[in-house]
Amino acid sequence: MKSLRKLLSMVLVVAVALGAISCSESEEVTPQLPDMKTIKCSAGDRPELVFTTQNNWRLSSDAVWCKFKTSGGDLQDISGRAGTHKITLVIGNEQIKDRVTTANITIIMGSNKAVIATVEREPDHYYLKVYDITGTPTTDKVIKISYGGYTPVLIEANFDFAAVEYPDWIDIREGSISGVAGEQVEAYLRIVPNGDRERFPIKKEDGHVITFSDINRSEDKTFSCPIIYSGMGDYEIVIEGPTENEFGWEVTPDGKSFSQITADGSEVTFENELLYNIVAQKNVYYMVYIENIIERGMPSYKIYTEGDDFWMHFDKERMALTVDPASKLRYGYAMALPQGYYNFISVDLKDDFLFETDNSSGIDLPVLKNDYLKYIATSLTQRSNNEADPETQMHIYHSITTYDIPATRYTDAGVKAYYGVEEAYTAPFINSIPDREPCIVINPRIEGWSTANYENGEVGVDVWYKGELLKMSDKEYYIGENVDELLSLQLYGPKSGFEIGGENIYVVFKVGGEAKKLLVVTPPTK
């Protein structure tokens, strides 16, 4: 019995021991590593690394410039027991560069290993560089802005930077410039136009700068970059007129009332003058005037420069266009040319340098080159805006060029009585064009003169030549709609016998069998 008790006691001791061992193994856990830290510093600094462990540990640095301060000297590897520790780092200047350099501090506890700190050492010096869009560094970090639109520049620094101050006349696209260390940033800047400042260049000596700094605006990370502006340039000009459209202006014969039909069909009117705002480099530009002379539906041009005697005038001080009185229909352009362009072409202005030939109609016609259309301040016609005016009461134009052929009052009372009309006009016939068969297209502007009334026999014409009534044919005349889809008479001559310097053609327009208007067509001159 005593032997049995002894055996049971031994079994119990073994079981307790095994249980203790089992419990010890189940409670063993992986050591907890310290949290990751980032330490920013400069050469010569002595930052501290604080961490806590529950196990013995060992630290190592992977950079010769980052060491641990100990009683035995500065070391790259140290070790210690569990607990909370404050380690002083020694930051040297070995391998220092013009950019941030990093060192990793690794902890080892048993079989566990991890980086617990990254040390970022500042560069040996700070820089900010400015490049043009081709990647070429600018002298003295100068930022050069050109006229018109945004100018691209490239900016690079070895610190995180932002533009913190700049003049209020500078516009930065997207509102700001910022970048991270070592990366080029593409920025876009332009001058804010106000109708005056853009006329004049801005030099480095004027003292305008953009200031870049880090987010904390540290003095050793602040750079001021001069801003210069090249100005508009001798070939640039801005022309702002009284409306957005420089074409389609009409002025009354007395030169006092200017009018234009706008895009929505309404009419705008200005009295005495048209006012402009012209912006050019240093306020230097030149006015050039072009008279569009139309003879028998064929255009030609005559050019006038400042100082020439012309019927348009431009007061540069007031930027006002005025027109002399006239008793006849006339057409003209006023152009404002920037200095550089004017100097380039002024020698050839009298040789029609501004014009080229348009053959789209099948005949050669001079037209203003597209390159010069942007310099037109106004294109105007001087005539009355009263529909009863003799030059607009009957609309006549060249069938090929479509240029107007003015009709004027015809006053021979005997001829008017002979054809039974009270209202009569006269207009010249067109000259011949080789291999073409042009005519004049006539809309008499008579009430009731319409395609529908022509088709029902209510309207018609009598065409008289050398005392004979001509018949409608493709050699004489025919009636149809013009380019505006209005009923018109196409008069061909007649082709067979309208001699140069010969007799007139008499065209009587009728409505309901009654003569309403007479047009006396004078013969060609060649």
Image (cartoon, rainbow, N blue to C red):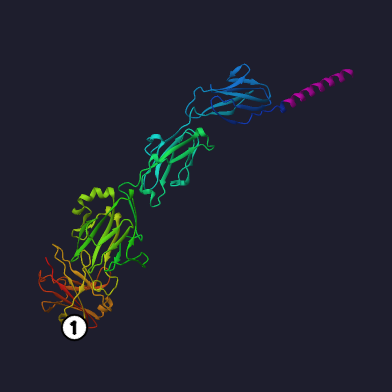
Query: For residue 311, which quarter of the picture?
Result: bottom left
Q: Which residue is mark 1?
A: 420
Q: Is residue 36 left or right of residue 254?
A: right
Q: Given the current orientation, which residue lies at the most extreme top position?
A: 72
In magenta segment, residue 13: yes
Looking at the picture, which amino acid does disc 1 mark? Gly
What percent of the width, then of the height, locates residue 92? 54, 22
| Magenta stretch in the rendered image | 1-24
What percent of the width, then of the height, locates residue 222? 49, 35
Q: Is residue 353 left or right of residue 247?
A: left
Query: For residue 355, which quarter of the picture?
Result: bottom left
> Between 194 and 359, which is closer to the camera in this rendering?
194
Local packing at callout 1 (Cα closer than 10 Å; few below 14, some 14-19, many 20+) is some
Q: Given the current orientation, which residue lies at the most extreme front position?
A: 317
What percent of the width, then of the height, locates residue 365? 20, 59
Query: For residue 472, which quarter of the picture?
Result: bottom left
User: What residue sits 36% from the left and 64% below the top?
Assistant: 263
User: What residue sits 29% from the left and 66% below the top?
Assistant: 250
Q: Could you tell me which secondary element the residue under label 1 belongs to?
A: loop
> Magenta region's main secondary structure?
helix
User: What residue sits 37% from the left and 66% below the top?
Assistant: 264
Q: How many marks?
A: 1
Q: Is residue 474 left or right of residue 369?
A: left
Above or below, 340 relative to 141: below
In magenta segment, residue 410: no
